[in-house]
Amino acid sequence: MPHPLPLAGITVVSLEQAVAAPFATRQLADLGARVIKVERPGGGDFARRYDTTVHGEASYFVWLNRSKESLTLDVKSAAGQEVLRELVAGADVFVQNLAPGAADRLGLAAADLQARHPSLITCTVSGYGTSGSWADRKAYDLLVQCQTGLLSLTGTPGEAVRVGISVADIAAGMYAYSGILSALFTRATTGRAPAVEVSLFDALAEWMSQPAYYTRYGGTQPPRVGARHATVAPYGVFTAADGKEVLLSVQNEREWAALCEDFLGRPELVADPRFADGSARVAHREELDAAIQARFADLDGAAATALLDAANIANAGVNSVPDFLDHPALTERGRWHDVGLPGTAPGIQALVPPADLSGVSPRMDPVPGVGEHTESILAELGRKAADIEQLRAEGVIS
């Protein structure tokens, strides 16, 4: 029999939108927390309208919001603020990633909330932090990729490109999630409920630490080298005779010798001064890559992969997204799970959360429709049917 979910009994109220905060709270919901998502009356979270590709729903929203309850609420109205205050008073965690200054204007600053509710864990997700001259700037994912220097590392020598996923948002969401878990543990063991604050900039800055060290102490930043590794060689994509692209990676001298002897058939390269160590191989990358590409030109993709596998050289075909969807590491291990969508839309296949806890099955309940749980949540707070209809007539809810 499965064990209870680790966060069963924890209530999270979230004034959230877009990606970062919803990603954090969805992971809390996966572990059994009750997550009440407060949305704007009418359209709700604007991420619902990013696209309509998942049976009419947005791919971002479907990914980030399963297993939550949706409450529509005009938090700028007096009646809406009263409802929100009641919700927060009964919550364990309050999360918000509103525009800069918006939470303060609503009386939802972390310090104010914790003064009123000492056991409440607050989590603020911002763009550039809540202090300093950048605190009031908008911080969408690509803007943060630019500001942290990530775009200067990603792409080819002739063109910088964005990372193909919302990496700054995802990083911030992960740190918000782990910060909230740490705060819940602290509260459980000491009684203190620390406030959590995460910015997109700080989260991605942490992920930029290796190139930051390389640049500060090496004098130059790593170059943009496309699908190759900026500081390790050989590490990149090569094209076989049948057009199949294969990435290979050599991480140490044993692997380098195996590549030369067992794949290239050129044992003399092992001791070649141009390739004597990692730094030398990076310095002579063009000559090295040319020798490897010449060998790939004599092999089809399957033969090249078989030789690399036999030599114990790490390699991977360059998959498309459809290839990834059917990857045996997912299908053979049961990593896809059915999740429902709002209304009568067909269900979807969603990935099981990556952290497996023995004896625990993550919660993967449906994605909520806008305001789907408004009436039931208000009823829990003691609102009668007539009160709810009055709030709807006044536009406080929808």
Image: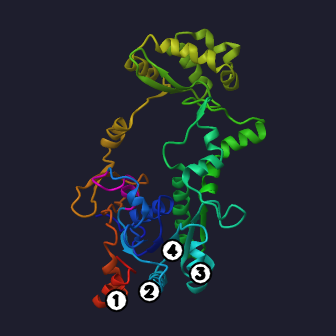
Residue beneath label 1, please? 383
From mark 1 to mark 4, how far is it between C-alphas? 22 Å
Q: Mark 2 or 1, which is nearer the eye?
A: 2
Q: CA distance from mark 2 to mark 1?
A: 12 Å
Q: Amino acid at mark 2?
A: Ala
Asked whether the viewer can see residue 109, the reply is no
Residue 233 placement (x, y as % from top left): 61, 25
Q: Which residue is mark 2?
A: 79
Q: CA distance from mark 2 to mark 3?
A: 22 Å
Say if the magenta span includes residue 55: yes
- In the rendered structure, which disc, 4 or 2, sits on the residue that comes first in sequence? 2
Amino acid type for the residue under numbered disc 1: Arg
For discs 1 and 4, the disc positioned in front in the rendered view:
1
| Dot 2 alpha-carbon crowd within 10 angstroms: few under 14, some 14 to 19, many 20 or more | some
Secondary structure beneath label 4: strand
The magenta-colored residue range is 54-65
> Of the residues tagged 4 and 2, which is closer to the observer?
2
